[in-house]
Amino acid sequence: MFQSDDQWKYFVDTGVWPKRNQFAPQEWITNFDSDEQRFARRLLEKFTYFSEDMVRQLFKSSFISLSKHVLKDKNDTNLSAREWGEFLDNLYILKVTGENPSDADSGFIFTRMSRDILGIPESRLLNASSFIETIQSNPKANFVFVDDFVGSGNQFVTLWNNQKIAEDVTFNSLYQSYSNHRFFYCTAICTQRGYDHLNRFCPVEVIPAHLYTDLHSALNPDSYIWRDFSKDGPSFIRDMSIKAGIPELPHAGVQVFDDGNKIVSWQGYLGLGLVLGFSHGWPDATLPLFYHNEGGFKPLLKKGQL
């Protein structure tokens, strides 16, 4: 059943969707002819928008799962105040950054959530120098990277293996020297591709609140998006993207310009073809058809890429 304009208004009023200046379904749907709107409305119906409150709940859920990994002897699903305190006592938070760290990196948002939602003291929110000091001085420390989304996993593999945190020092080189420590990666959403990639190349235990498989990709005709609807959904996305002027880049890649702007292939980064956005932005894995805004095309998502 397709959503009507009244249903869309209800979604905004109840906080399921954001305000119109960030998310504009009524405008976006006008990009399509009457015979195309059947597919466009299906995409809207299956689009997942994670509000700020939902992201907070996902973040908490990921940490509850993490506590079970750390407290190995704990079988009950509820933690007492003492057990939660035990869990937090030697827990340290590390943010995930891009190759050129910026205050706009989503890892900063989730580092603050660790403090504000979980009550982790500011002193345990580590930068590079305090991380090196902690891993050398506290043999019981558990380290947790935090972020919102893992797509390919490439960014984190680069961070772990290649990004220098001091002269000739990487996370991996320190791990090799202090292998008694455990490292975790708590994320709201992780794709199966990213999960497998991280498990292959990093000794880090990945704990997502939600794991996205191929069944979450709009480019898979057997996904939940097109199930019981039409096998032609992926073809619709391709045709409409080309019609809108969204390019197809080699290997479904991303082109970044000197001014920081970038173009993502119509399939979403690496062909992940996701239909999701967060209150603070959206990943490259999300279909550009949702945020393209050139040549008179009206975007659904307006806030900004992550």
Image (spheres, rainbow, N blue to C red):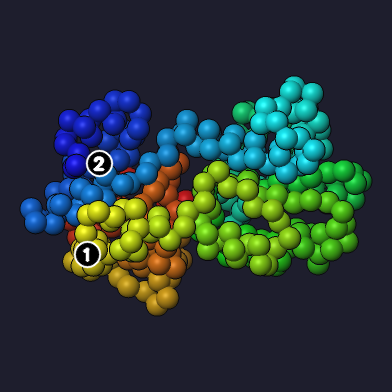
Q: Position of residue 239 (x, y in %)?
A: 20, 67
Which amino acid does the dot numbered 1 rest on? Asp
* Image disc number at residue 232: 1
Which numbered disc, 1 or 2, marks the residue closer to the eye? Answer: 1
In this view, the residue farthest toward the top is 81
Q: Earlier in the sequence, mark 1 or mark 2?
A: 2
Which amino acid does the dot numbered 2 rest on? Ala
Residue 15 in the figure: left or right of residue 298: right
In this view, the residue farthest toward the bottom is 250
Using the image as rendered, state which of residue 21 and residue 251 is in the foreground. Answer: 251
* Image disc number at residue 24: 2
Residue 148 in the figure: left or right of residue 278: right
Using the image as rendered, state which of residue 8 and residue 207 is in the foreground. Answer: 207
Residue 2 in the figure: left or right of residue 193: left
* Residue lying at 70% horizontally and 31% vertically, measured from the top left: 76
Instruction: Name the element at disc 1.
Output: loop
Instruction: Name the element at disc 2.
Output: loop
Mark 1 surroundings within 10 Å by alpha-carbon count, few (fewer than 14), some (14 through 19), many (20 or more): few
